[in-house]
Amino acid sequence: MLGPAMPITTTTRITITTMLDDFLVRAALAGVGMSLATGPLGSFVVWRRMAYFGDATSHAAILGVALALAADLPVTFGTLVVALAMAVTVATLASRGWAMDTTLGVLAHSALAFGLVAVSFVPGARTDLSAWLFGDILAVTRGDLALIWGGALLVAGLLIWRWQALLTATLNEDLAHASGLNPARERLVLTLALAVVVAVAIKVVGALLIAAMLIIPAAAARGMARTPEMMALLAVGIGAASALAGLQLSLWQDTPAGPSIIAAATAIFALSAMFGRMGRR
Amino acid sequence: MSALIRAEHLSVALDGHPVLTDVSLAVAPGEIVTILGPNGSGKSTLLRALLGIVPATGGRVARAEGLVIGYVPQRLAVDRTLPMTVRRFLSLPKRVGDAAAMAALARVGVPDVAQRQMADLSGGQFQRVLLARALLAGPDLLVLDEPTQGLDQPGEAAFYRLIEEVRRETGVAVLMVSHDLHVVMAASDRVICLNGHICCEGTPRVVSTAPEYRALFGLGTQGALALYQHVHDHSHDGGHDAGSGHAHHYDHTHHDHHHA
C-alpha cells in the first residue's frame, strides 16, 4: 500500500523502524510462545505444590549454561540436559520419601551457587551472566524464537495429550491407580515438561525468574476460574499479557525485561486477588 | 460363581515391616464384604494391595478378566488452588455425558450440586459425589476405604443404606473397610476381621459374637461399642444364637426390601 509521499531523507529512519519492529515483534512472540507452556504447566506446579521443584530445576539451568559454554555446545542443549538431570533427581528423591523442603532447599540453592562458580571459569560468559539470570528477551533471534515456540508447543501438546490422566493423578494418586493409570508416569510427564520449559524460558525471563513465570500467572488465574481448564487458559492469557506489558515497560523505562514481565504478572495477580475478594463478599 | 477378585495367601510389607500376613479372601459378584479392624491393622493396605497400588511381598492377587473397579478413596483433599466443579470431577478420568452425570448425582441423592465447587461440599455430599463418580465407570466391584469418615452417625447410616440400595439395583459387588461393625451390619453380607491377618470372618452376626472379634475390639470391657452392643442385644428378643441372622439392623433392611 502506498503511504503519503515520503522524502528520500527518511529512508534510513524507515530501515531503523523496520528493524525495531522486527526485534519487538520477535520479543513479543517469544513472550507469548513461552506463555503457551508456562500457563498450563504453571497450573500443575500450583496444584501439586511444586514451586520449590521449579526453583531447583531452573536454577540448575545456570550450571547447564556454564557447562555448555565450556564444552562449546549449544546453550539450549546444556540447559535442557542439566535441568532434566535436576528434575529427575528431585523426583527420584521425592519418591524415596526424602524430607522435600530441606532437600529442595539444598538442591535449588547449591545448583545456583555451583552454576555461578562454574560460569566464572568460562571466559566471556561472565559478561553475559545477567542475560542468563534475568533473561534477554529483546535479544531473541529467529533461531531462539523457533526453539521457544517449538519447545512451548511440545510442552502444551504433551500436557493436552495427558490432561485427563494428569488431573486425576493430581487429585489423588490412588484414585488414578484404581482407574488403571500410572501416577509415576504422569509425574514423569510433568518432570520432562518442566525441563523443557526451563530451556525455553531462560532466554525470556532468565533462570532466576522461571519459577515466578510458572506460579504467578497461574495464581492470578485461580480466583477467576471455575474449572482446571479455565485456569490453565487464563494463565496462558495472563502470562502473555504480562510478557507484553513487561516488554513495554522495559522499552519505556529501560528496565530489565525479565523482572519487568514478572512485575507485570504480579500486578495482575494483585488485581485478581483484590477483585476476587470483593466479588466473594 | 467365580470370584471377581481374590487374594491368595497375600503378604505385604511396607518399609520392611510386615503389615499383612497370609491373607486369603474372595469377593463374589453382587456380594457386600466389609473388612473390619482397629487402626494399624492393615485394612487400607489390604485394599491398596488388591487394587495393585502396593506390591505383594508374598502370595498373589487375582482379578476376573476385564474387571471394572469403582474406587472411593478414604480421603480426597481437593486443594484450594485447584478449581473443580462437581460436574468436571465426574468426568475424571473418563469424560461422561451430562445426562449420565446428572443421573448419577440424582442416584446418590445430591441432584443439585453439579455446578458447586468440590471444596465447598459438606462431608456427606462429598462422599456421595465420590460414589457417583465411581458408579459412572459402570463397575463390577465398588471398593470403598472408610467411606464415612467424618460423617455423623445418621450420615453414616444413610450412606450405608445408599450402598445397599445401589447394590440391589445394579448388582455391583462391594468391598469396603470400616472401623465400626454395627453401622455396617445391615449392609454387609460378610465381615472379615483383620489385624495383620484374618482373625475371623462370617456374617455380621457371627462375627459380632466371635471371641476373636471381641478380643480385637475389646468387647465385654467398658468400650462405647460394647455398651451399644449390649443395648442392641437386649432390644432383640433373647436371640443370642450366632447363626440366627436376625439382628436388629437386619430387621430394618428387610422392611426396606419389601417394596422392591
Image (cartoon, coloured by chain):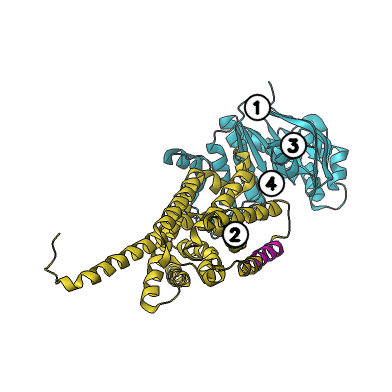
| Mark positioned earlier in the residue sequence (1 or 4) | 1
> Both on one chain, marks 1 and 4?
yes
Q: Which chain is yellow?
A: A
The residue shown at (69%, 37%) is: B52
> Please, which residue is most extreme toward the bottom here?
A253
| Residue ID for mark 1 | B29
Q: Nearer the viewer, mark 4 or mark 2?
A: 2
| Mark positioned earlier in the residue sequence (4 or 3) | 4
The amino acid type of the residue labelled 3 equals Ala
The amino acid type of the residue labelled 2 equals Gly
Q: Main secondary structure of the magenta part?
A: helix
> Please, which residue is most extreme toward the top here?
B1
Q: From which residue to which does the magenta span run?
A: A102-112
State the hue of chain B: cyan
> Is A97 displayed left or right of A181 in the figure?
right
The residue shown at (52%, 56%) is: A76
**Crowd band around label 1 with a 10 angstrom C-alpha radius: few (<14), some (14–19), many (20+):** some
> Is B38 displayed left or right of B152 in the figure?
right
| Residue ID for mark 4 | B146
> Both on one chain, marks 3 and 2?
no
| Residue ID for mark 3 | B247
- In what element is the residue under mark 3? loop
Figure label count: 4
The residue shown at (42%, 66%) is: A139
Above or below: residue B145 compared with residue A93? above
Distance from Cα at disc 4 to Cα at disc 2: 48 Å
Residue B81 x/y as whole percent = 54, 60
Residue A2 x/y as whole percent = 13, 62
The amino acid type of the residue labelled 4 equals Glu
Residue B29 found in image quarter = top right
